[in-house]
Image: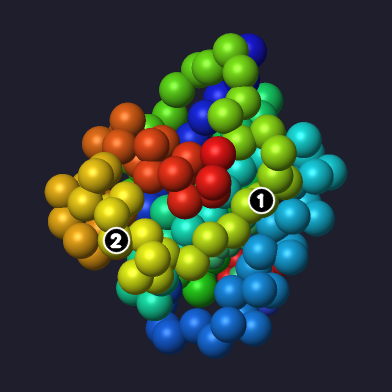
Amino acid sequence: MLTRLIYASEPSQPLTPAAVQDIVDHARAANARSQITGMLIFDSGAFLQVLEGRREPVSETFGRIAQDKRHRHVVLLSVQTVDERLFGRWAMGFAAADASGRDQFLRFGGSDRFEPYTLSPGSAVGLLLALSGG
Ligand code: FAD
């Protein structure tokens, strides 16, 4: 039995590409140790992340993420029990939510901008999958 958790947040202050890469590198190493997989999408204004794995490590990891001062307004969009991973290829995949994703933002969010706080759980999964190329 696996848990899939999705949340949205916004950076507390502007993040340099190097700072975002640092977050992704750390997440990849830590998640691999905990058998957590997932995907992180970022634009200058918001994060959208999915974590998949056993319930305890997902919960523990999200607890650390939620306390991280590099972002704020951490809002859970969905927590569900699932049989299979949808994002099993990546300890933490990463995609920039830039203008190339406009069609996907429209398709899943009804807006041509990346606005993760307004996504339904199903739309959040759809957008994460679409931007992951999966
Ligand atoms: P410590 O390393 O002891 O750090 C304590 C606090 O210091 C952190 O909460 C943070 O506020 C701050 N901090 C840590 N490193 C830096 C830095 N380089 N620059 C500035 N401040 C810093 N971790 C995962 O394990 N898996 C994930 O999938 C994951 N995804 C993340 C997604 C986002 C959007 C963000 C912002 C962070 C993510 N993290 C992830 C990192 C996570 O929030 C913790 O920082 C990390 O797990 C280390 O936790 P710790 O308690 O050991 O903190």
Q: Quadrant of the C terminus?
A: top right
Looking at the image, residue 50 lies above or below residue 81: below
Nearer to me, 22 or 85: 85
Q: Position of residue 90 (x, y in %)?
A: 70, 44
Secondary structure of the residue carrying tag 2 is: helix
Q: Quadrant of the N terminus?
A: top right
Q: Residue at horizontal 54%, vertical 86%?
A: 16
Q: Which amino acid, by three-letter code, is at mark 1?
A: Met
Q: Position of residue 13 (x, y in %)?
A: 41, 83
Q: Residue at horizontal 69%, vertical 74%?
A: 22
Q: Is mark 1 within 8 Å of ligand 1?
A: yes
Ligand 1 falls in which quarter? bottom right
Q: Position of residue 2 (x, y in %)?
A: 61, 20
Q: How is the image coloured?
A: rainbow
Secondary structure of the residue carrying tag 1 is: loop
Q: Which amino acid, by three-letter code, is at mark 2?
A: Arg
Disc 1 residue crowd, few under 14, some 14–19, many 20+, Cα 10 Å = many
Residue 55 in view in this figure: no
Per the image, the residue denoted by label 2 is 102
Per the image, the residue denoted by label 1 is 92
Looking at the image, residue 8 lies above or below residue 38: below
Residue lying farthest to the right in this orientation: 33
Q: Are marks 1 and 2 in contact (CB under 8 Å)?
A: no
Nearer to me, 111 or 24: 111
Residue 84 in view in this figure: yes
Q: Is mark 2 within 8 Å of ligand 1?
A: no
The tag earlier along the polypeptide, 1 or 2, is 1
In the image: residue 103, left or right of residue 87: left
Image quadrant assignment for residue 20: bottom right
